[in-house]
Image (tube, helix red, strand yellow):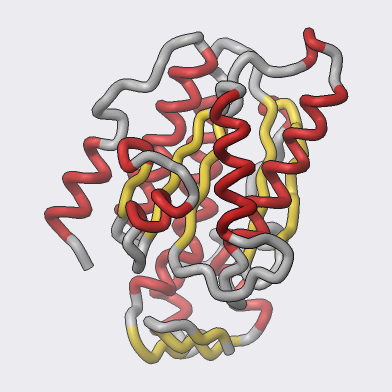
């Protein structure tokens, strides 16, 4: 079982992993009695949609010009690094072994640890090996409630320091006031977006991040309306 504020799932581990990996349709699992859902059924659809959309945008980026190193950190009550500065051409597609939901939200620990990790790599790397641009993207569907290693003040200071070095931070939040959370972490409201936590909302997130990566890897700056589609969708369908 997995419980959060919106839904209670009851299923077997094999069924859950199959849905997350895209080999089983959530609706089919529900109609066949393999997945019981109490609450918002949209959550069940997110399990399979997240991996599909992430993989779609990765394929698109692999075809674009410019070198990209990818670091991917998944977090709930603890963090798990599944890609650590891997060349985008060598990043494998997400599978049921990589992504599943559950646990609490140790947002500060995940952000703090990852910023420190990349910062230290840049610090000790040869100048020619430090990327021209660093884009740090934060996505969460809930409030911080489980961090034990980093405080908000510590993470804010880390982000301030890296912004001075030219890092770009984008933050996406669902079920929270993402602008307030971003403000607490020294991320300007122009770089923060509230999103609808469903298939359409997540698809928009990945599409927008992909465009941002494409922009930066060609040496351009993000447009002022980079998150226009997400903002419009959130206002129209706010949940």
**107 lies above or below 7:** above
Name which residue lies at 74% across and 43% down.
116
| Residue 136: % across, % down | 56, 37
Instruction: Name the side, left or right, on which 107 lies relative to 45.
Output: right
Instruction: Name the side, left or right, on which 74 lies relative to 40.
Output: right
| Residue 134: % across, % down | 60, 26
| Residue 109: % across, % down | 67, 60
In the rendered image, which quarter is residue 187 located in? top left
**172 lies above or below 213:** below
Q: How many marks?
A: 0
Name which residue lies at 31% across and 36% down.
190
Instruction: Name the side, left or right, on which 189 lies relative to 233.
Output: right
Say which of 126 and 73 sits in front.
126
Name which residue lies at 33% across and 44% down.
204
Of the 4 image quadrants, the one containing the N terminus is: bottom right
| Residue 203: % across, % down | 37, 47
Name which residue lies at 55% across and 48% down.
156
Q: Residue furthest left?
A: 236
In the rendered image, which quarter is residue 149 located in? bottom right
Say which of 103 and 167 sits in front.
167
Of the 4 image quadrants, the one containing the C terminus is: bottom left
């Amino acid at each position: 079982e997995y419980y959060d504020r919106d839904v209670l799932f009851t299923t077997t581990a094999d069924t859950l992993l199959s849905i997350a990996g895209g080999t089983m349709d959530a609706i089919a699992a529900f109609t066949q009695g393999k997945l019981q859902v109490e609450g918002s059924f949209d959550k069940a659809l997110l399990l399979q949609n997240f991996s599909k959309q992430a993989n779609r945008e990765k394929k698109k980026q692999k075809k674009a010009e410019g070198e990209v190193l990818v670091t991917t950190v998944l977090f709930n009550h603890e963090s798990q690094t599944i890609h650590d500065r891997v060349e985008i051409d060598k990043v494998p597609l997400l599978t049921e072994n990589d992504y599943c939901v559950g646990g609490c939200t140790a947002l500060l620990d995940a952000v703090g640890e990852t910023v420190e990790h990349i910062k230290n790599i840049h610090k000790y790397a040869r100048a020619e090996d430090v990327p021209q641009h660093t884009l740090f993207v934060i996505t969460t569907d809930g409030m911080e409630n489980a961090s034990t290693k980093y405080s908000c003040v510590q993470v804010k200071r880390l982000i301030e320091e890296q912004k001075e070095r030219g890092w770009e931070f984008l933050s996406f939040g669902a079920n929270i006031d993402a602008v307030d959370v971003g403000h607490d972490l020294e991320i300007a409201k122009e770089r923060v977006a509230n999103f609808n936590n469903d298939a359409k909302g997540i698809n928009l997130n990945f599409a927008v991040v992909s465009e941002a990566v494409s922009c930066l890897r060609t040496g351009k700056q993000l447009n002022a309306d980079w998150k226009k589609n997400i903002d419009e969708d959130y206002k129209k369908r706010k949940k």
